Amino acid sequence: MTLLQTEPTTGPTLEQAEKTVDRTDWVSSLPFFAVHAAPLAAFFVTVTWKDWVLCGVLYVVRMFCITAGYHRYFSHRSYKMTRFFQFVMAFGGTTAVQKGPLWWASHHRSHHRYTDLDDDVHSPRDGIWWSHVGWILSTKHKDTDVSNIKDFAVFPELRFLERASWIGPWLLALACLLIGGWGGLLIGFFLSTVLLWHGTFLVNSMAHIVGRRRYATPDTSRNSLIVALVTGGEGWHNNHHYLPASVRQGFRWWEIDPTWYVLRGLACLRVVRDLKNPPARLLDQARVRDGAFDIGMFRSYWEQAVKLTGDRIADLTARPIPSGPDFPTRATAVGTSDEASTEPAAENPDGDDATRLAGLIARTLESADQFAKSTRRTRTMDKSILEAGSTSDPKRG
Ligand SMILES: [Zn+2]
Ligand SMILES: [Zn+2]
């Protein structure tokens, strides 16, 4: 247990204890901030155009190791390769300074399992900062859940890379220093590492906030051209959450997906094989524009509304109700019944409101889930049945 995981001494609530763990651990995060500061030293050394080329090349190559390797291979097994190339890809991934392949893929699999739910490691529902870097800077997710990545944890060479994930970055930094001197190190290595980090992090933050939703997935994932350009094709995140096992994430010709183009090239060279493409029959199903109920966004908006309402109720019940005709009562302010409005705060404890609210939330989400299932099912039914209006009963879901 680390310092930050220790609970406060004066009787913390569960929520307070959780926040303690979720907070940035400034001490263990020092290297993260030092790497951000390092490129600033380039103002005091000679930087040539070669250093900028090195920066660009290292960004592109290492991004590929993350998107094709850590993500599409180790997390999703969307294609196959030999044990030798698997090791090469894993080693390339470690040079991106994003820990080892097992840690990365284990957490990413967890993200897909619990997307935008309480156990999601980096959902923007816990704040943009948290989804972008907060979850990495806290100590909450520093360990690897090996049970989540048993299929790759059986390889001793990957377990070694996991323990020694520092070797790749140090060797690369040294190579940059030898190739380009201080300029090569500060711009070629450090600046490209910082850009690479935030490029990758955008998929966890922005790809769940900005962009369009084609498929009614049970989460908030979006398709974003900008994120796709920055990450070599990972911006088609709504497509990806719809069909995570697909090696191709840009489903249309205009959805730029350089990672997939390179993997196709590598397949021609027999470096990789068995690329899993999205099944054609699924591409036109569950689309929001065809009327599939967007349970992911419904859940997100509903939770936001519930939080605001809950805060308002807690706020109002915590204060004494002012008397006199000029002040609205607590109940009318939050839109409850007249009967409730006549009760003073002390006689209607917070617990009642909270229990009622929790019940309503659970029941509404339950019906929304059923409704989402029913709309998805109608997509697979005969169109003539749809036109005849026989699917209007939501209970059939
Ligand atoms: Zn996601
Ligand atoms: Zn994924």
Image: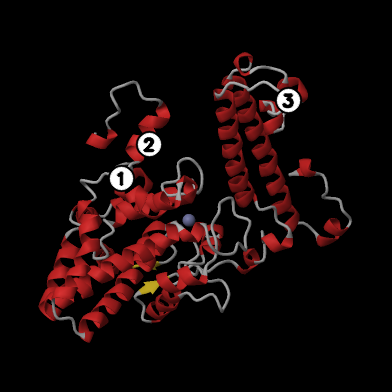
Q: Position of residue 330 (x, y in %)?
A: 66, 27
The quadrant where residue 169 appears = bottom left
* Up-down relation of residue 14 to residue 95 (above or below): above
Between discs 2 and 3, the one toward the N terminus: 2
Image point 41% across, 27% down: which residue? 14
How far apart are labels 2 and 3 at the CA level?
41 Å
Asked whether residue 259 is in view, the answer is yes
How far apart are labels 3 and 1 at the CA level?
48 Å
From the viewer's perspective, is the residue at label 2 or at label 3 nearer?
A: 3
Which quadrant of the rendered structure holds the C terminus?
Answer: top right
Few, some or many residues within 10 Å of mark 1 (<14, 14–19, 20+): many
Structure colour scheme: secondary structure
Q: Amino acid at mark 3?
A: Pro
Between discs 3 and 1, the one toward the N terminus: 1
Q: Amino acid at mark 2?
A: Lys
Q: How many marks?
A: 3
Residue wearing tag 1 = 24
Tell me the SS state at disc 2.
helix
Residue wearing tag 2 = 19
Q: Is residue 160 left or right of residue 259?
A: left
Residue wearing tag 3 = 325
How far apart are labels 1 and 2 at the CA level?
10 Å
Few, some or many residues within 10 Å of mark 2 (<14, 14–19, 20+): some
* Up-down relation of residue 349 to residue 229 (above or below): above
Which quadrant of the rendered structure holds the N terminus?
Answer: top left
Q: Is residue 99 left or right of residue 315?
A: left
Furthest residue toward bottom: 49
Q: Position of residue 133 (x, y in %)?
A: 35, 53
Few, some or many residues within 10 Å of mark 3 (<14, 14–19, 20+): few
Asked whether residue 82 is in view, the answer is no
Q: Amino acid at mark 1?
A: Thr
Furthest residue toward right: 388
